[in-house]
């Protein structure tokens, strides 16, 4: 067989040749813009030629600080298809972390949305590798202290619309990179190779996964600065799907409107987004009958939310699982043909699991006594292997924590049922190890949060002389329960649902649970707080 | 990203783990057999362990002479997943050619269907590399002069059902091979690598191509000794599709029955097969409502046949194009979303073309003045490049005829329309070069064969002093036309359909057109015959 490399170049060339009429709808600060793939292809080539003139060379990192729009999509191809590395920077990180990763990646050029310019101005003296700033604006170049600064559209005007992309890159060469937050310390970088991105995009096109196709209208709500918007823009370009990019500061109403007007068929985002959309659909009337799949990842979607999408609004909902280190698609809740015979409730239970392994990857689940049984009960850490799974953190000593013996240890504790469907039960570090057995903090939390008077609940481990660790429940009551609901009542509520040794040793009432910037429980802080409080009991 | 290789091992392991209950239906000489993927996986591992005990080592060629059945599917994985090479031998070749390719490939072991045993007995003294013969029979080992000979099922009984397949093979290592007939001389061998087969199977799973899925029931009519049954068995195992293998000596009635009883969703074969099935459907009643796609390749399907499938029987028909050298899927007649607006007749015209390039490959069409225009008119030779396109003929000097500058020159002359859809108009060697322009023999033949009194027609070139070459039409009349239809009448029939310089210089009436063993026009012989006849005119 020919040794032709798997490169992003073939994706954009296919879109230009076979789907020149298909459309990219992009919402920017000035409103809706429409481009054909032909126009977009020429703009992308102009950008590549301009970056080359600015001195960007093979292997150089080019950072983007941008929302989901056509210019970001141009950067997605202009940079890697000319041999450089697309470094998408999470604009929601703290300024210190942004400075860290720009320096760690040694970004040469930054492509910046106008609303992010002030953030970069504040740190411009701390990022010496950056030799040029390019502002991706519809209007004039804003007044700025950044230097040297370029106007994106002016660069494009001077660019060459028939710039030749490279077909001779090694398929294992880096095409992109993305940093993921760490629980402690600086973010960790993951490098995506051309080969990894191409194979991952192919996996997204499989009928048995997300089946991204020319017939789709794809709206990635997940940010393009977050794991390549789950690879959806790459697959959509390759297969010639119409794309709808919602730009900055979208609201649920705006998303629902775009979905209706542009006849969106597939969208992808985190549970918070879908909760917002559900709310919007309950308040206002939209025709979303074109939607064939709402992909949900990032964290587990509650079964009630899935039920509302499917039963109330007739919108197919699909759980998926992955992480920055896995490109990200690794597991998807696609049903098997014989699952058609399940009851509606059993189907919902299946959809509430993360799903089965995507073709092309390998998996093992390591419990305390080796690989776990496929019984939906035994818990173990999910480990993954395959051509779109990272092999290391970029120049980072923490590589050895997660990458061992050729496997990525995800840090996610899961069960797997008889049919191979995975359900995430906890993070390894939040798991409670009691008397040699494992207790899932998430399971107890979910049970607590189903109580009518409980607003939120978090369960953490405290050290225990005899049992090693024991669970403590932290509960925030709703107004309806304050002053009336007792510890005993909550314990009685839990008892029929769990084995006796799973029950928390103590229930603490708190005013709120400490949270991270993206709204996840900050269990590390909570553990410290609980240990202090327990000493006083 | 991890450097995990793309190997067939991951396909069978996925089927065993995730789809152990799914079924393989296999028709052998004794009737219908049913196996689950779990059972089939164990049998495949037993076979691999037995081959290993027989001395088969990494890189060794193991030949199969077999129809489409479960044992052949076991060989499809047992051989490559233990590092050896699956050499599928076309049982319809002449004994001399079979001897040539066994010797050329240096096959160590042959797996043989009982009805092929007599053929191999006749040549057993001419194939010295073969150290063992294994007969794949349901019953007792037949009386045979083959030596040493083994009974397939007895070998399996002694085999190890938990034999470990290899995960450490180089993805570029050979996994399979297949010989393709040449117009002159011996067949030419093509080697398939693990990487090529895996990527090709992934392409078969794309929603935009054939979308092979767990939900499918796949029936490959195309023989497993012919380009891996177009890769369908590999994709079906990987994605966990139910498979229906029709075994030896199937009739259209038997195929229609299997399709109905097993609820087949996707099938693949050459036009002759589908003509036979159409005939059967017109004569007897079947419920084939489960069929979502009939894939047709090998040669062009007439538009009338496509119309009958689609309009009369409501069965979606899909043209595809490929060859032994292309694994084979290269081009597929999938429509674009905006083609939904075409009229029924325009849709049929689109379906009668071979289609657009499959994602992952690269293509160019080289005419007499460089790459052709995308106008549906200009003709050029189709050249292909990509990771499942062969780079050479196995140890064969004829490599340089077809493989040049990193491209496979297919020898097929095509046009390409504005939308990128390819239509095959001729083989390069059958094209008529007249006055510096090209004339498609196939176009004139199709026009002639649409005449009510013409049974068949072939058009060939004869040398011409002034114009270099000129077309001569050879026509076989139906009984209805014999003695009444004249040359002038036929010429008048052609005139409105073609430019003047396309019209044949002469029309010869023949009793029959010479044909190859598979029913294609033998144009080389016909050209000689016509040149002789023309001298007499």
Image: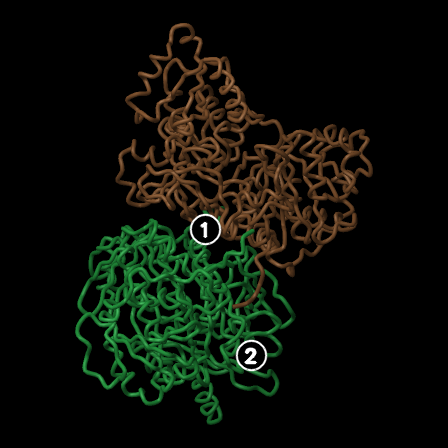
Chain colours: A green, B brown
Which residue appears farthest toward the top when viewing the image?
Answer: B483
The reply to whether residue A301 is visible in this rendering is no
Q: Is residue B28 left or right of residue A218?
A: right
Circle 2 residue: A401
Residue B288, quarter of the rendered image = top left
What numbered label is drawn on residue B414?
Answer: none
Q: Nearer the viewer, residue A534 or B24?
A: B24
The reply to whether residue A293 is visible in this rendering is yes
Q: Nearer the viewer, residue B459 or B71?
A: B459
Could you say where residue B361 lies in the image, as x and y percent from the top left?
45, 51
Residue B338, quarter of the rendered image = top left
Which residue appears farthest toward the bottom when viewing the image?
Answer: A536
Could you say where residue B59 lies in the image, as x and y percent from the top left?
69, 52
**Residues at marks 1 and 2, CA–CA distance in whole angstroms:** 39 Å
Whether the residues at callouts 1 and 2 have beta carbons within 8 Å, the answer is: no
Chain name for mark 2: A
Q: Nearer the viewer, residue B474 or A288?
A: B474
Could you say where residue B421 lies in the image, as x and y percent from the top left?
36, 41
User: Mark 1 vs mark 2: same chain?
Assistant: no
Crowdedness near tag 2: few (<14), some (14–19) or many (≥20) residues, C-alpha within 10 Å: few
Circle 1 residue: B361
Residue B125, quarter of the rendered image = top right
Q: Nearer the viewer, residue B213 or A351?
A: B213
Tag 2, which secondary structure? Answer: helix
Residue in the image at 40% along x and 20% along y: B449
Chain name for mark 1: B
Residue in the image at 62% along x and 77% along y: A436
How many marks on residues?
Answer: 2
Rendered view: B354 above or below A383: above
Rendered view: B450 above or below B290: above
Mark 1, mark 2: which one is toward the viewer?
Answer: 1
Q: Is residue B483 left or right of residue A30?
A: right
């Amino acid at each position: 067989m020919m040794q032709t490399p798997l490169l992003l170049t073939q994706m954009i060339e296919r879109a230009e040749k076979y789907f020149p009429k298909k459309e990219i709808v992009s919402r920017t600060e000035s409103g809706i813009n429409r481009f054909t793939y032909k126009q977009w292809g020429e703009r992308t080539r102009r950008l590549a030629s301009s970056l080359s003139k600015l001195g960007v060379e093979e292997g150089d990192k080019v950072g983007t600080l941008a929302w989901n729009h056509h210019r970001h999509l141009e950067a997605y191809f202009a940079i890697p298809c000319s041999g450089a590395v697309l470094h998408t920077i999470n604009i929601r990180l703290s300024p210190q972390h942004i400075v860290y990763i720009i320096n760690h990646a040694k970004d040469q050029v930054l492509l910046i949305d106008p609303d992010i310019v002030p953030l970069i101005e504040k740190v411009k003296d701390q990022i010496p590798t950056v030799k040029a700033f390019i502002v991706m604006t519809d209007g004039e170049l804003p007044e700025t202290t950044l230097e040297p600064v370029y106007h994106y559209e002016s660069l494009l005007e001077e660019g060459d619309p028939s710039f030749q992309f490279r077909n001779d890159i090694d398929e294992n060469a880096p095409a992109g990179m993305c940093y993921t937050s760490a629980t402690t310390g600086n973010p960790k970088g993951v490098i995506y190779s051309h080969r990894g991105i191409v194979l991952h995009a192919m996996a997204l096109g499989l009928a048995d996964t997300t089946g991204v196709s020319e017939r789709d209208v794809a709206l990635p709500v997940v940010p393009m600065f977050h794991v390549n918007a789950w690879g959806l823009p790459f697959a959509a370009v390759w297969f010639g799907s119409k794309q709808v990019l919602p730009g900055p500061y979208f609201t649920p109403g705006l998303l629902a409107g775009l979905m209706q007007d542009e006849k969106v068929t597939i969208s992808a985002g985190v549970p918070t987004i879908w909760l917002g959309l559900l709310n919007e659909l309950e308040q206002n009337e939209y025709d979303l009958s074109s939607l064939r799949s709402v992909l949900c990842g990032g964290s587990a979607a509650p079964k009630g939310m899935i039920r509302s999408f499917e039963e109330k609004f007739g919108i197919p909902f699909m759980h998926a699982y992955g992480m920055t280190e896995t490109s990200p698609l690794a597991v998807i809740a696609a049903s098997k043909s014989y699952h058609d015979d399940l009851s509606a409730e059993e189907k919902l239970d299946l959809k509430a699991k993360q799903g089965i392994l995507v073709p092309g990857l390998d998996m093992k689940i390591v419990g305390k006594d080796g690989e776990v049984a496929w019984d939906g009960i035994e818990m173990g850490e999910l480990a993954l292997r395959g051509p779109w799974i990272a092999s290391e953190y970029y120049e980072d000593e923490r590589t050895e924590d997660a990458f061992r013996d050729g496997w990525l240890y995800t840090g996610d504790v899961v069960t797997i049922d008889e049919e191979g469907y995975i359900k995430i039960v906890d993070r390894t570090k939040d798991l409670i190890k009691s008397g040699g057995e494992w207790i899932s903090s998430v399971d107890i939390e979910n049970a607590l949060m189903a109580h009518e008077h409980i607003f939120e609940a978090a369960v953490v481990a405290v050290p225990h002389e005899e049992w090693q660790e024991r669970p403590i429940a932290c509960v925030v009551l709703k107004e309806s329960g304050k002053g009336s609901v007792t510890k005993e009542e909550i314990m009685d509520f839990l008892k029929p649902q769990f084995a006796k040794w799973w029950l928390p040793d103590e229930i603490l009432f708190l005013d709120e649970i400490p949270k991270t910037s993206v709204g996840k429980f900050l269990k590390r802080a909570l553990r410290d707080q609980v240990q202090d409080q327990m000493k006083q009991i």
